[in-house]
Image (spheres, helix red, strand yellow):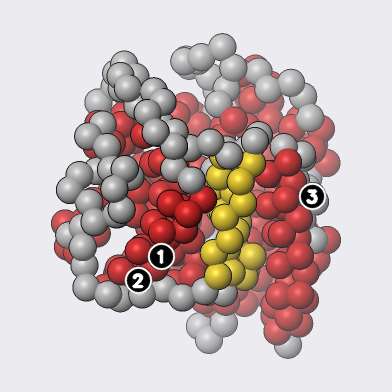
Amino acid sequence: MALDLLEAELAVELPAHMRAFARAHADGRPPPAAPLIARLASTLQTARNACMHDVLADRGLALLRLVAPLVIEDDPAVVVARAMPPTWQNLSTLAAQRDAAARARFGLSSVQLAHRLHGVDATRHDHDAPGPAIEGWHERDFAIDHTGIIDAWQAIAARTGVTGTVRVDRSKKAHPRAFVIEPKVEVVIVVPEVIDTPAARFAVLHELGHAVAALALPAGVPRVVDEAAASYIARLAEPPSWLPPRWPSELAAAARRRRTALAAMLDEIERGLPTLADTPSSAPPWALWHDPGAQGSYVEAEVIADRLAKDLGPNPPRGQLVRALKAERDRVDHRTRI
């Protein structure tokens, strides 16, 4: 009964919150606070209780993936640390506070918790060094307008068989990001006002891949599956591609390999926090400060996307990708224990 009540209240509050979040991101404003119900200790306890019962475990795990990071980020010491200037030393302090909050509630560090909740293996994957930037990847060539984005999405939706509403908002300030307003029903994609480089087109396709996952699967998608769907769709930027003209780029495959190597490098740093053995830049990347555990998910997602690409090919029959994503989610959910 408690789980039913929580899910009903979140179903009412989360869509409005996510729309406000999308608007804030597009405007370059700080995001609104998550609904209070999602940050309460009692909500976390209800989710954990549900995970202990076979009949409710799937729903409990989906709820836990939502509320566990919110409860940690809402810890008073974490709030104070997150407000500090984003330096490497302060990242170490922030990671220590997150770890203390996570261990007090789960007996795991913050990154370990994120990895376990979202299907990241404890075993690290070997990768080459990132190497130099891909020449031409960020150079301007031609612009994709709003109609071009919609055409690409309609082609993707038709091939994958997903239904639902995808709204594309343009922004002068924001980087591309997908916002799930309601799973299997509605997604908002925020994209730059000008999309005129291979890197920008790839980033848009990546977010459209998140839309595929959001419209194909119920709430609580493990991060590795969500990112794998995004990677699979973004690989349509790699020739040969059935997307409309101008979306593919000969540079896309090399850029993907470099991104994965960068994520593996940052994952190595993040797993070692709060200890800092090396700092590869003057300031920590945005994701290490605001999105703990994400780097491991990116690396693991590429392994899954490789498997999807091998099993399905770049142009699978309608509905096959959705079925494969459901199977990947079932695999991750089955082995997730908190």
Quadrant in which the N terminus is drawn: bottom right
Question: With 172 as the anchor, is 225 left or right in this view?
Answer: left
| Amino acid on which the number 2 mark rests in the picture | Ala
Rendered location of residue 141, percent (x, y): 37, 28
Q: Nearer the viewer, mark 3 or mark 1?
A: 1
Residue at 79%, 49% in the rendered image: 32
Q: Secondary structure at mark 3?
A: loop
Relative horizontal placement of residue 230, taking residue 71 as reference (left or right): left
Q: Is residue 64 above or below residue 275?
A: below
- How far across and how far down the image is residue 267, in percent? 43, 33
Is residue 319 rendered to the left or right of residue 273?
A: left
Few, some or many C-alpha atoms within 10 Å of disc 1 (few <14, some 14-19, many ≥20)?
some
Relative image position of residue 172 (x, y in whole percent): 65, 35
Q: Find out whether the residues at labels 1 and 2 contact each other: C-beta distance under 8 Å.
A: yes
Residue bearing the label numbered 1: 154
CA gap between label 1 and label 2 equals 6 Å
Question: Mark 3 is on which residue type?
Answer: Pro
The disc, 2 or 3, on the residue closer to the chain's N-terminal end is: 3
Residue 12 image position (x, y, % from top left): 76, 75
Q: Earlier in the sequence, mark 3 or mark 1?
A: 3
CB contact under 8 Å: marks 3 and 1: no
4 to 197, vertically: above or below: below
The residue mark sitting in front, 2 or 3, is 2
* Quadrant assignment, res 5: bottom right
The residue wearing badge 2 is: 158
Instruction: Name which residue type carries label 1.
Output: Gln
Q: Are marks 2 and 3 in contact (CB under 8 Å)?
A: no
Q: Crowding at label 3, few (<14), some or many (≥20) Cα neighbours within 10 Å?
A: some
Distance of label 3 from label 1 (alpha carbons) = 31 Å
Q: Which residue is mark 3?
A: 32
